[in-house]
Amino acid sequence: MNCKVQSRMKIMLLIWFLLGISVRVARGQRTPSHAAQAISSHAQPHRQTVSITFLAVPNGSPVHNFASDQATLDLGSFSYFPRFDVKGAEIQRQEDSFIVLTRFGLCIDLSNGHHIGTATVSAFLLSPNFIGNVWVDGLRLSITPGIIGRQVRYGAFIEHILKIAVPISMPAGQLLESIGVIVTPN
Amino acid sequence: MNNRAILFAGLITGLFLVPGLALAQGQTSSGTLTVTAQVQSSISLSFITDTNGVALVGAGTNVATLNFGSVSQFISPPAKVTETIAATSFTVSTPFDVAVVKSNVTSANYTLTAEVQTADPVNTWMIDTFPLTIVPAAATSLTVTGVYGTDVVHTLYLTIPFSAGASIISNSINFVATAN
C-alpha cells in the first residue's frame, strides 16, 4: 500500500514538472505585443512564420509592395466633384463628406508552404488622428483591432472592400493613413 | 497495471504536445497597408429654379435652359415672367438661383462672372444690374463675395427693341465661379 502511494506521488510530481515546462515553452512563443510591426514575425527564423501579402485586384487601386508584409495602396487624386484621375476607386458623395471606395486583396501564408489551418485576420488604424472614417468590409476601424476575417485559410486570396470617408471640411492635401493587419492562427 | 501504464503514457504524450500546440497558436503576424491619396479642393456650380422664376430645364445641374416663352409688347407675359415697356423697347425678366458649393477648400467666398457666348447686335442681356459682355470681351462680374452653399437669386433681363422683327431669340450665358 505504501509503495502504491509512493508510486502515485512520483507520477503526480512528474506530471507537475512536465506541465511547468510546457507552460514555460508556450509562454516563450507569444508575440510580445499585438501592435508590433511585421518584422516581429521574422525575428525567429527557426519558427514557422505567417506572411501577409497585399495584392491589387481588378477594378481596384494599385498596390505597391515595398517590404515584407508592407504595402501602399495608391488611390490617386480625387475630389468631391469628380474631375481628377481616381485610380480604381469609386466616389460616393454625401452631404458633408465623400466616400472613396476601393478594393484590395490579402493573402496569408505559412513559411513552410503548407496551406493547412485557418487564421483570424484583424485590422486597425495605426494613427488615431485621421479626421475621417475608414472601413474594411463594413467594419469601422479604430486603433483597437477589429476582426475582418475569422476562418481565413492559409494560401487563400481574399478580396476586401476599403471605404474612406473624407469630410468636405478637411483641407486639400495628402491623405496618408496606415492600416495595421494582424493574423492570429486559429 | 497495463491500463495504468497506457494512461500514464498517454498523459506524458499529451503533456509533450501542449508546447507544440502553443507554438502553432500563440504566434501572430502583422502587416501594414498604407493608403495614400491626394485630396483636391473643388467647387461646383448649379442652377436652381427660383420660386418666383420660370422652371429651369436641367435645374440642379450646371447646364440649364431658361425659357421665357412667347413674349410681346402687347401680350401679357407668361407666368413668372415680368415685362416692362419702355419708349423703344420692352424687357422681360425672371429670377433664377445659382448655388455654389465647395469641398476641401479654405476660401470664404467666391467670385461669379457671366458672359454671353454669341454676339447679339439686336437685343440686350443683363443679369441683376450688370449688362452682360459678349465673348471675347472680359466676362461681367456679378459678385465678388458669393456665399457658398446658398441659393443666390439672380435675375435675367432680356431687352428687345420694338424695331426687332419677330423671331426666336436664343443664346448661351457662361457662368464661372472662382474660389477667393
Image (cartoon, rainbow, N blue to C red):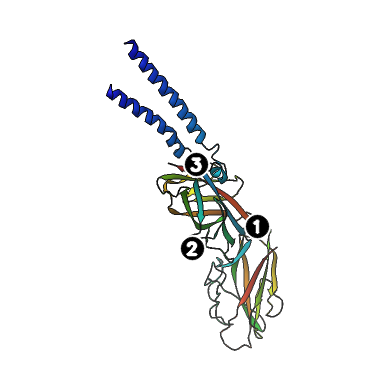
Mark 3 residue type: Arg
Local secondary structure at mark 3:
loop
Q: Quadrant of residue B16?
A: top left
Which of the two residues, A153 or B62, is positioned nearer the viewer here?
A153
Q: Identify the residue under disc 3.
A: A47
Q: Which mark is residue A173?
A: 1
Foreground mark, 3 or 2? 3
From where the camera sits, is residue A113 visible? yes
Foreground mark, 2 or 1? 2
Badge 2 or badge 1: first in the primary sequence: 2
Cα distance between the residues tagged 3 and 2: 37 Å
Q: Identify the residue under disc 2.
A: A59
Looking at the picture, how far across and down is residue B129, in whole percent? 69, 72
Foreground mark, 3 or 1? 3
Which residue is the extreme one toward the top? A2
Write down the chain letter for disc 1.
Answer: A
Q: Residue at x 62, y 63 (%)?
A: B43
Mark 2 residue type: Asn
Write down the chain letter for disc 2.
Answer: A
> Is residue A174 left or right of A157 when viewed as pictured?
right
